[in-house]
Image: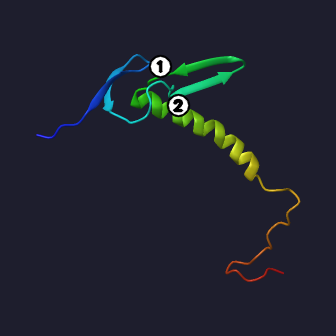
Amino acid sequence: MARREVIEVTCDRCARTETQPKSNEPMHTPELRVTFHGVTTEYGDLCVRCRSAVENYFKSMTKRNDEEEKAPDKSEEPPAKTGLFGGKKS
């Protein structure tokens, strides 16, 4: 029978208790620290479901900024018009 070391984690966000693989990260650093309008919230331990939700929220917020940076300039020339088979249209 194989053995592995796990820890029991109680999620600071939803209070769910689950076992997770033991990590080598220091235990004193919070997993998530958010400051919004001067209010700071910290979560030391997150369950897999909450960690995934937080990751998706973060990707969603940063995606908006990335899309704004990648927006094409209005000064660019529009693509040349082509015919049905790729030939130039007169």
Q: Dot 1, how many residues are within 10 Å of its Cα: few (below 14), some (14-19), or many (20+)?
A: some
> Which amino acid type is marked by label 1?
Arg
Say which quarter of the image contains residue 2.
top left
Q: Is residue 8 left or right of residue 62?
A: left
Q: Dot 2, how many residues are within 10 Å of its Cα: few (below 14), some (14-19), or many (20+)?
A: some
In the displayed orientation, state which residue is furthest to the right.
75
In the displayed orientation, state which residue is furthest to the left.
1
Residue 22 image position (x, y, % from top left): 33, 33
Residue 6 image position (x, y, % from top left): 28, 31
Q: Quadrant of the N terminus?
A: top left
Q: Which residue is mark 2?
A: 54
Q: Is residue 24 left or right of residue 81?
A: left
Q: Is residue 56 left or right of residue 46?
A: right
Task: Name which residue lies at 65% across and 43% down.
Answer: 63
Say which quarter of the image contains residue 26.
top left
Task: Name which residue lies at 44% across and 24% down.
Answer: 45
- From the viewer's perspective, is residue 57 above or below residue 74? above
Residue placed most toward the observer, 4 or 81: 4
> Which amino acid type is marked by label 2?
Val
Task: Name which residue lies at 57% across and 33% down.
Answer: 57
Measured Cα–Cα span from mark 1 to mark 2: 10 Å
- From the viewer's perspective, is residue 64 above or below residue 47? below
Disc 1, disc 2: CB below 8 Å? yes
The label on residue 13 is 1
The label on residue 66 is none
Residue 71 image position (x, y, % from top left): 76, 52
Say which quarter of the image contains residue 60.
top right
Q: SS for tag 1? A: loop
Q: Quadrant of the C terminus?
A: bottom right
Q: Closer to the N terminus: mark 1 or mark 2?
A: 1
